[in-house]
Image: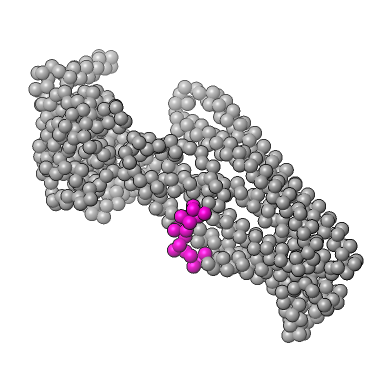
Amino acid sequence: MNSEKRDYSVFDAELSGQVLSLKLLRRLMKWMKPYRLTLIISAVLVLVSSSLQVLMPVVLSLVVIDHIIMGVTDHLVPDMGTIAAANSLAETLSLSPLFAACLLYAVIHVLWTLTGHLHRMTLTASVINGLRDLRLDLFSHLESRPSSFYDRVAVGRVMTRVTNDIEALFELLRGVGTLVGEFVPFFVALVVLFAVNVKLTLLLLLVIPVMGLVTALFRRITQKLFREVRMSLSALNQNLQENLAGLQVVQISERQAYNLARYTTINKQNRNLEKETATVETMYGAFTDSVSGIALAMIIYYGGGAVVQDEISLGGLVLFTRFIDMLFHPIVVLGEQTNILFRAMASGERIFQALDWDEKVREPEIPVELPPRLSGKLEFKNLNFSYLPGQAVLRNISFTIHPGEKLAIVGPTGSGKSTLIRLLGRFYDFEDGQIFLDGVDLNKIHSRDLRKRVGVVLQDFHIFSGSIYDNIALGDPNISRAMAVEAAITVNADQFIRQLPKGYDTQLSERGQNLSQGQRQLLAFARVLSANPEILILDEATANIDTETEILIQDALDKLTKNRTSILIAHRLQTIQEADRILVLDNGEVEELGSHTELIQNEGVYFRLHSLQFQAIEEDVEQN
């Protein structure tokens, strides 16, 4: 699908999610499959833990109260073998029946705690490992998306999928495990209660639909509130990021009071929403506590009468009171988990939306294998290109760069200089026209192979966290430390590197802020040279630097471009006058092509650009 036909707005859409979408869960299982053994162990442990949770009230009510204290021998209610276990303990260890029952209760409680802990640990370990793999796959997928994708999708939206949305999936999978752990004892307790007294159980069950209805209403209200809270928090973070990123401008313009007022307004909106959410949650908590109390009162009233009439034992009545929490707590947990599940399912939708985004640079089915070393001849034939339909950026571009030639490309801002370079690096697909490298159509060369042969130094190049050497080699095992040092010496970067505290092992801060602009550019030269590409592209590479550093770079340029096809893009015309030829672009078209002397004599576009810039330089000199 062509990029212009895609709906990029989906990356900005607010997704609602679906509670426990089976399709999404099935897809998630792909990443959980390698850890299915620990998941199976976790499932067994939660079943054991849930069964033990039910046994504890049974021991308390049927063994201690009915069997030992009340002396009931005719047990109509299933005790699940707890009476026999208590008797066996008493006989084996010569204990009193009551002490043996208490010991049995303590052992069951310890086992319940232990199995519950192991269940949570094995579940968490499986989820963490699976989501780690998912995050790696998502990162790898997003790294392979073309530039056209990031031209239309905000990087912040993409980052959210790798960070926040993956974290939300952890809550989803852990929440599913929590619900399983709650509802297993719910059903077991229900079976036991029906065995104790059907009428009393049915009476108790009348409360559950009320709990369910209120929980559903709570979910609808809080779902809307949580979405508004999330949006207000996003606005709050965005405002904070803008202010901190532009702190120098804020302080220079004395804008602090104005920014504080804006931040206070957004913060107040967030506070009001958070308070409203807390109020609803508090009311829901008070309601569930009240319902549990009312249910307990009903059980005591009706159950007490049943005990008097010998319809139920005292232990059976106590069992009902103990099982109330097991019946109601899962409903409460479901209400608490539903909003988490909604947000998590929406995160899952966003993650798989990104994983399913198949936009990429078209690669040849059978790519041409390039020779060990290229001569570096480039041919552009009738090349047309536009980022958006109907808005041409390049029009009928045709010219040739000979092996080892240094070609400078100049033109006004927006004339298409950088676009030409992006097409040469296969960062965008193009169909109208051709580019040849040593006679081979670029569309028949795999982009990975092509980019190894084309070195690019951008005006706004990126410094990674790590050492100086790491930033030169970029993790390429073929670039040894000696090669990196040699490249740095060639581009005059070695001197300032050795003056750093740890030389080539000096750790660089975020975006290389502990280096000057000129030093970062020299480092970029060393990075490209160490890869030894046959074609060198310098896109505004000497802009925004001091005169002394520019002299060093100009010296390095002579070494870099020797016996290497080179393309120089610059607004500063004095940096390209020594090029073999100069290509002049204007409004996406080739206006002129020739040497500096020839273009000056033509008195065309290049002549005007040259005259305007040198006039500006002379005016600056006079003012100084």
Task: Point out residue 492 in the picture as x, y percentages from the top left corner.
Answer: 22, 40
**Picture residue at 58% right of the left edge, 54% below the top:** 175
Residue in the foreground of this view, choosing between 595 and 161: 161
Is residue 352 found left or right of 479 in the rendered image?
A: right
**Picture residue at 25% right of the left edge, 15% below the top:** 619
Q: Is residue 621 above or below residue 374?
A: above
**Picture residue at 38% right of the left edge, 45% below the top:** 357
Q: Is residue 96 above or below residue 497?
A: below
Quarter of the image that includes the C terminus = top left
Q: Is residue 339 above or below residue 411?
A: below
**How many numbered discs, if any?**
0
Residue in the foreground of this view, choosing between 306 and 437: 306
Q: Is residue 369 visible?
A: yes
The colour scheme of the drawn protein is one colour
Task: Point out residue 250 in the picture as x, y percentages from the top left corner.
Answer: 47, 26
Quarter of the view holding residue 600: top left
**Picture residue at 15% right of the left edge, 18% below the top:** 604
Q: Main SS type for the magenta part?
A: helix
Task: Point out residue 188 in the picture as x, y percentages from the top left corner.
Answer: 68, 66
Is residue 223 found left or right of 154 in the rendered image?
A: right
Quarter of the view holding residue 412: top left
Q: Is residue 556 above or below residue 287?
A: above
Quarter of the image that includes the N terminus = top left
> Magenta stretch?
22-39
Is residue 509 found left or right of 86 in the rendered image?
A: left
Residue 44 in the magenta stretch? The answer is no
Q: Is residue 170 visible?
A: no
Which residue ends up furthest to the right in the rendered image? 308
